[in-house]
Image (cartoon, rainbow, N blue to C red):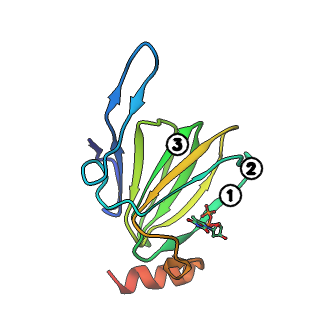
């Protein structure tokens, strides 16, 4: 299921299946079924100070799905034309980002865990760490 409040075609919130049980909830993701790319990498942020700022960069081609597995955080997205903020806090939902999205993550709650599924192995060459470089790249590549 996809929520349609996205202001850009470069991001969407997906809602994944949930199996509810008196013993707790279970959500599952199958590669090739629920995730629109082959998962090449998983990483997660934890022990994040509540006043930390993460992100602050764009990517050229990387696709990602970002989850708040525990707690919450704010993620601000920018495609070079529009900005949109999401407060992620539902472990059943994942924020899908295509390439050419600038992202900033802050307002972490105590104990928040941010898990990211990524379409490519880590490659510093895919990063755009300067906002003006990101804007130039995003606008020149359509
Ligand atoms: P960075 O992507 O800048 O962190 P964030 O966007 O969450 O603030 O990465 C921080 C450091 O970790 C940087 O030195 C690169 C390294 N890193 C890896 O080695 N592999 C990875 O998969 C990621 C995401 C980062």
Q: Dot 2 lies on which element?
A: loop
Residue 29, compared with residue 25, is above or below; it is below
Q: Earlier in the sequence, mark 1 or mark 3?
A: 1
Q: Which residue is mark 3?
A: 68
Question: Residue 109's image quarter?
Answer: top right
Q: Which residue is mark 2?
A: 51
The CB of the residue at mark 2 lies under 8 Å from ligand 1 = no
Residue 18, compared with residue 9, is above or below; it is above
**16 to the left or right of 69:** left
- Badge 2, how many Cα within 10 Å: few under 14, some, many 20+? few
Q: Earlier in the sequence, mark 2 or mark 3?
A: 2
Residue sitting at 58 percent across and 40 percent down?
72
Q: Which residue is mark 1?
A: 53
The answer to the question of whether label 1 and label 2 lie on touching residues, with beta carbons closer than 8 A, is no
The CB of the residue at mark 3 lies under 8 Å from ligand 1 = no
Residue 110 screen position, x and y as percent: 70, 37
Question: Residue 120's image quarter?
Answer: bottom left
Residue 125, compared with residue 55, is above or below; it is below
Residue 18, compared with residue 66, is above or below; it is above
Q: CA distance from mark 1 to mark 3?
A: 15 Å
Q: Quadrant of the N terminus?
A: top left
Residue sitting at 70 percent across and 49 percent down?
48
Number of the front mark, 2 or 3: 3
Residue 142 screen position, x and y as percent: 32, 80
The CB of the residue at mark 1 lies under 8 Å from ligand 1 = yes
Disc tally is 3
- Badge 3, how many Cα within 10 Å: few under 14, some, many 20+? many
């Amino acid at each position: 299921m996809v929520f349609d409040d996205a202001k850009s075609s470069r991001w969407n919130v997906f809602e994944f299946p949930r199996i509810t049980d008196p013993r707790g909830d279970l959500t599952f993701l199958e590669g090739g079924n629920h995730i629109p790319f082959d998962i090449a990498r998983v990483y997660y942020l934890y022990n994040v100070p509540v006043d930390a700022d993460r992100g602050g960069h764009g990517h050229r081609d990387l696709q990602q799905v970002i989850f708040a597995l525990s707690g919450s955080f704010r993620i601000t997205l920018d495609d070079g034309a529009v900005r949109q903020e999401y407060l992620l806090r539902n472990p059943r939902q994942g924020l899908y980002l295509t390439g050419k999205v600038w992202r900033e993550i802050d307002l972490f709650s105590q104990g928040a865990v941010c898990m990211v599924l990524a379409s490519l192995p880590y490659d510093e060459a895919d990063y755009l760490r300067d906002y003006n470089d990101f804007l130039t790249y995003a606008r020149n590549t359509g």
